[in-house]
Amino acid sequence: MGDYQFQDRQPQVMKDNVYLLGEAIERAPELKGVPTGVKGFDELFFKVEWEDGKPVKKPLGGIPEYAVVNLTGMPDTGKSLMAEQFTVKQASLGQKVCFVTVESPAAFVAAGLKQRATAMGIDFEEIENNIILIDAASNSKLRDDIPTMLDTLAYVYRTYHCRKTVIDSITGLFEAKEMLARSIVRAFFNFMKKWYQTAIFVSQKRSGHDELSAEAAGGYAVGHIVDCTVVLSKEILLSPNRAKAFKKELGDILRILRIDGCRLCGHDTRLHLMEITELGLVEVKEPLVEYLKGAK
């Protein structure tokens, strides 16, 4: 079978895709952090520098620039809130942000972004022209035809000079065709890299998935392709023993965040407590192990 496939094939050498390491490193961007607007989250990423002959961890101050970050979790774990906080924070810093809304029509997303800005103490009128919405929720052509979506993104990037992109959710772009999930996610990942975007992809978990695994709808395709995966989970404490262990009331919600790998920089690998405040903002708290030590 192998001989039959290749016996009439002419060699095709892709020389343009072969690099010496020294050539490739010259094209690599400087490692910098991009603030997310999520309290306690940006400090979980770091880089290593040598000082006096010893490696020293230096806070990055955000997710790595030009990274494609996957936020995954069950419903009501704070994924969209984190994506909106990132959008508002970057817009407040004068950055143009492209927000692709796949689940809710643009008007509803705009209302949510305004609420997030108010809670963060940011004047919405000062940022509203820095956020460009692509309403894929209201247009099946954008959802179902990937080339059309990519052409529309390219138009936004050229017109508004965006360097930040949010897709909420990437899962909505391969509904009912999860066999194609890997190729669809790969297409968007490569597109983000081509346009030098710092991007957040929100992805959904199915109810059968382990809460703290990186798996999302479409299998592990998203997590294997992107630069970084952040897993959000929640547990309703219905057991008296569980509630007591976490010093919470019976029926309270325990929220946890975990970074499931980041290939572009160092990161805190521990489980961290997370809260959604009364103002609707996600905040990352202390590591779970430290919290449990204090709870004893």
Image (tube, rainbow, N blue to C red):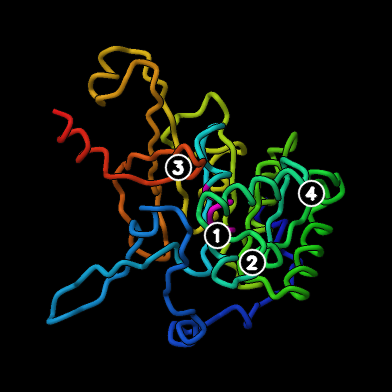
Whether pointer 3 and pointer 1 mark residues with C-beta atoms closer than 8 Å, the reply is: no
Q: CA distance from mark 3 to mark 4?
A: 25 Å
Residue behind mark 3: 231
- Can residue 21 be seen here? The reply is yes
Residue 128, given in percent of the width and then of the height, sits at 69, 62
Q: Could you tell which of marks 2 and 4 lies nearer the N-terminus?
A: 2
Residue behind mark 2: 126
**Which is nearer the eye, 36 or 94?**
94
Residue type beneath disc 2: Glu
Q: Find numbered disc 2 in the image and state the secondary structure of the residue it sits on.
A: helix
| Vertical placement of residue 56 versus 39, above or below | below
Front of the two marks 2 and 4: 2
Q: Residue at x 45, y 83 (%)?
A: 25
Residue 121, given in percent of the width and then of the height, sits at 51, 56
**Can you tell which mark lies on residue 136?**
4
Instruction: Tell me the magenta residue range.
Output: 82-88
**Which is nearer the eye, 153 or 182?**
153
Q: Could you tell which of marks 3 and 1 lies nearer the N-terminus?
A: 1
Q: Quadrant of residue 11?
A: bottom right
Residue type beneath disc 3: Val
Q: Residues within 10 Å of mark 3 (few under 14, many from 20)?
A: many
Residue type beneath disc 1: Ile
Residue behind mark 1: 122
Q: CA distance from mark 2 to mark 4?
A: 25 Å
Whether pointer 1 and pointer 2 mark residues with C-beta atoms closer than 8 Å, the reply is: yes
